Each structure stands twice: as structure tokens, then as C-alpha cells.
Amino acid sequence: MTGSATYQSVFLRDLRLSTAHSLVTQSGAPGFVLPNETPTRYLQALIDGLCELSLRDPLTGLANRRHFRTMLEREVDRMARSGEAALLLMLDIDHFKKINDTHGHIAGDIVLQSVARTLLGCVRPMDTLARYGGEEFAIVLPSCQATYGRAIAERIREAIESTMIRVSPALALNVSVSIGGAYALQWIRSTTQLWIERADNQLYQAKSAGRNRICIEEQPDSTVSAEEKSMLFGPLSTYFSPTDADPSTAPLGGPLDPAGTSQ
Amino acid sequence: MPSHPALSSTTPLGEAVRTRPQRRARIIAVTSGKGGVGKTFVSANLAAALTRHGLKVLVLDADLGLANLDVVLNLYPKITLHDVFTGKAELEDALLAGPGGFSVLLAGSGMVEYSHLTPEIRAKFLQVVETMAPRFDVVLLDTGAGISDVVLFSVSMADEVLIVATPEPTSLTDAYAAIKVLATQQKRQHMRLVINQAVRPGDGRAITGQLQQVLNRFVTTEDGQPVRLLHMGDIPADPAVRDSVMRRQLLLQATPGCAAALSVAQLANKIKSMLPP
């Protein structure tokens, strides 16, 4: 129940809904009809349809920048709680301006749509894929182990490089992308802005290094591995020695001995 | 004493790293990894001990309002850094005289909202430290627990890092993680360790040695050098500490002769010897 308008009657004929109606019906699948059993159901479906539209990029159907920002914020919060690594990739189509200039904007649009489709085939359903700007795309990959990040980026780079894009019956193009990536760091509650900045920096480096390549920020390792812990507290530890049962004979074990906590 | 080498203009997290003015305070970040190990206790009492050496000392609540510095020092000012950041007051008005004769800058509770660091807040924070640095001999940054970007940012402004840990395994694991992050991310070649609530003499030295061994094996800085951990001393577990905290007094004023107070004084001697003559 939101706001004071809850108990006020609304008559559909008093509202200017025709534009919204056609926007939502046109964006739906062919044959899509808004429900009209009750005014409430109709309005709710119309609003849902508009919300959905406001989150998508019309050309590629990917999440737009607004939606992406929300997803990124959610991921920063989730990260700080779960401690699972998440990767942000920023992609930019190489020499896109040349495509537009040489083959026209329609060709450019077809390239953007094709790249979007290829990207969709490379990511998991849980990943958020967005058109970030003109020829720039962004991908948030939640629960992405540090070791997989580069492999995923490489898979994307290869997939795009090897896809022929037919822009007209007589012309097929093939484009490459530069990819920059940065992890949201475990334990670190950062901001979406900083995260984007860091990924963007890497993208810039990939571009300056010659394009069609990947740069992912080295992740400062903030996790303490089992191996490190066992060296800190394990049997070889000179300070913490779980085998010293008798404090009086253990000059450096004794009352502080974390037996049982070292595993 | 060499500080960490000059970094590029930004660290991996995008923090600005200052250029060094000619004559200014040694900036020391007091940090821990784990909370509740006595960072603020160490900051406040170390500040008092350094002041007794005739040094001009500033303690800054670098946890942006989440630190307990106000509680430990029993200071509840009307004007805080929050007012300075929001343009409601001048920095001078927020500068307080602490109980031990040192100066204090408190963040104010309104700063909690800044636990997400924006570039504006970073710039203002840096500006506060830059403005204050030439006027003091030592600036102690009482940072937050954990490794948030607020902590990383405040530590990035410091010449020296003083890590406070207790002998408990959880505290040491977190201290180790913090050392690792600071070594790799801020390319720090050395960090200083003080063991609080030490149970027996020699605890701190043994713990430092143990941590150093693990660091040697697992952590190298960019130039391939291991990180050096310097043991700065132990503060023994002492019931007088708890009493002073309960009474909201500095340990050095409440019971200056107790074992913990004497070891804080020793720590101050060591810190003083790091300073240029």
C-alpha cells in the first residue's frame, strides 16, 4: 500500500494511457495483449511493462545503464556480506567509429545487436549484461572466482573476434573488443563508482596496449588460505603449537595455545 | 626511516596519494584488521605519551565516526569534522584539546553515512590531513577495523602503519590479512606491530617472528622483497586498562605507573626515535 492515493478511485478514461499502452504492447512479443479483466490488473500490467521498458536498452535488449547501476549496487552490498568475489568487466568495441563512418549507422546498429547476442551466449543467467554507453558494454559476474575471471573474459573476446556479422547481403564484418576488468574485493565495502573507475582504467589500458585484448586488475589477495593458517598456527608454528599440552613445559605455547582453533 | 616508496598518483582502489611537503608531521595509521583489540586505546595513550616528550600530536578519528575515540577521550564536541565536510564550520573550530595535552579531530556521528567513500569525501579527508600535517610532529590516524575502503584510504595517507593485534588467533589472522592487503595494494615494505593484551614477556617478539615467517613464504611486494614486520613492543594485559576505560580516563593519567602504561611509554620512546631530530 503506497501513498495517500490508495483509497481514491481512479477511472481509466480520465488517464492518458494511449502512449503507454502502445509502448508496452509494441515492446512485447508478437500477439502480446495487456490483461483487461479489471482496471487494476490492466494498470498493474501497464506499469510493470513500463518498468521493464525503463530498464532495457531499446536497441540491444540488454540492461540499460540505469538498471546496471542498481544491479552493481546490489552486488556491492551482497559482496560485503557474502565475501564472494565478483568481477566487473567493461567492454568496448574496437574502432567502432570507423564502422559507422564507413558503412553507416545502420551497419553500426547491426554490429551492436550482434555483439550483444554473442555476449549473451557467453555469460551465465545470473550475470548482468548491460549496454553501458555507445559501443561500451558492461558485465557483472557475481560469485566469480579470481582464477576464472580471465578465462571468461578471454572466452568473450574470442567469441566476438570469431563471429562474422552480416550487415547487408553483400557485406559481412568482423569486430574485436577490448576488455577491462576489476574485482569487487572480498571484505572491502567499496562503491559502485570506484568499482567502475577501476574497471574503466583497465579498459583504457587494454585500449592503449593495442586493443583486442584483456586487462584485469591484479586482485590484492585479502583471504588467508588454509595453508597460511596452518603455518601461522599449525604444528610447525614456534608460537602456537597445538601439540604442547602442558603450558609449564611450553615456553611459547601455554595459555594462549589455540588448540582446535587452528584448523 | 624510509617510508613506502612514492606511489603512482592513484592506488589500485583509486585513492589519491599525496605528494610530500617539506616539513610536516609523521603520519602514523593505527590499524588492526580485527576490531576490539585496542586501536583507540593505543592511539589515545600513545598520543599522551608522545606529548610528554614535548611533541605536538594530533589524533584523528579516521574511522569517520565509527571509532570510539570520543568515548575513550570523553569528548563530546558540538563541532566535528562532519560540520567541516558539510561546510557548516571551519576546520579550526573542530580542533579540540584532548585530555593529555594533544589535539583531537573527531568525525562526528553524522559521518556514518560516509562509510561509503565518495571521491568528494576522500578529497576533503585528504585536505584535512594535509592542512594539519605541517602543524604537528605526529599525526595518529585512528582507523576503523577490517579492510574497508575507508580504512585503506586513511592508511594510504600515512607514512607508517602501526598494527595493533592481540595474541588471539582470530586477531592475528585478521592482522595478517590486513598486512597482506597493505603490502600488495599499497606496496608497503614494512609495517609495525604492537601486541596488546600480551600475557607473557616475549609474546610479541614470538608472534612477530611467526607472522614474519608466513609473510616471507606467501607475501612479496612488487619488487620481490618480503614485507618486513617490525615489532614495536608489547602492552601487557593489565586490569588497570579496563579501569581507565571504564572511568573514561587515559591510562597514562589514571595509573601512570602500571605495567601497561609503562609499556605505552616505551612504545612512545620507540616512535620518537623514528622521528627526524
Image (tube, grey):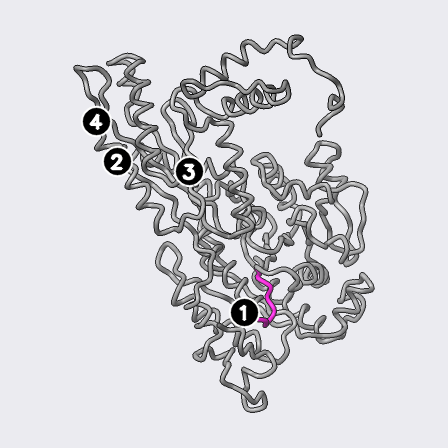
Residue bearing mark 4: A164
Q: Is residue B163 magenta?
A: yes
Foreground tag (3 vs 2)? 2
- Residue A141 in which image quadrant: top left
CA distance separating discs 3 and 1? 37 Å
- Going by the numbered disc 2, the residue's amino acid type is Ala
Image location (x, y in percent) of residue A56: 46, 25
- The reply to whether label 3 and label 4 mark residues of one chain is yes
- Going by the numbered disc 3, the residue's amino acid type is Ala
Q: Earlier in the sequence, mark 4 or mark 2?
A: 2
Query: Measured along the vertical axis of the image, is residue A32 above or below residue A71?
Result: above
Q: Relative to the observer, which residue lies in front, A225 or B38?
A: A225
Identified at 45% across, 80% down, the residue is A235
CA distance separating discs 4 and 2? 10 Å
Q: Residues within 10 Å of mark 4 (few under 14, many from 20)?
A: some
Question: Which chain letter goes with mark 2?
Answer: A
Residue bearing mark 2: A159
Q: Residues within 10 Å of mark 2 (few under 14, many from 20)?
A: some
- Going by the numbered disc 1, the residue's amino acid type is His
Question: Which chain letter goes with mark 4?
Answer: A
CA distance separating discs 3 and 4? 27 Å
Are circles 3 and 4 on residues that touch, CB within 8 Å?
no
Query: Measured along the vertical axis of the image, is residue B196 above or below residue A31?
Result: below
Q: Residues within 10 Å of mark 1 (few under 14, many from 20)?
A: some
Q: Magenta region: which residues?
A: B162-169
Foreground tag (3 vs 1)? 3
Q: Relative to the observer, which residue lies in front, A26 or B170?
A: A26
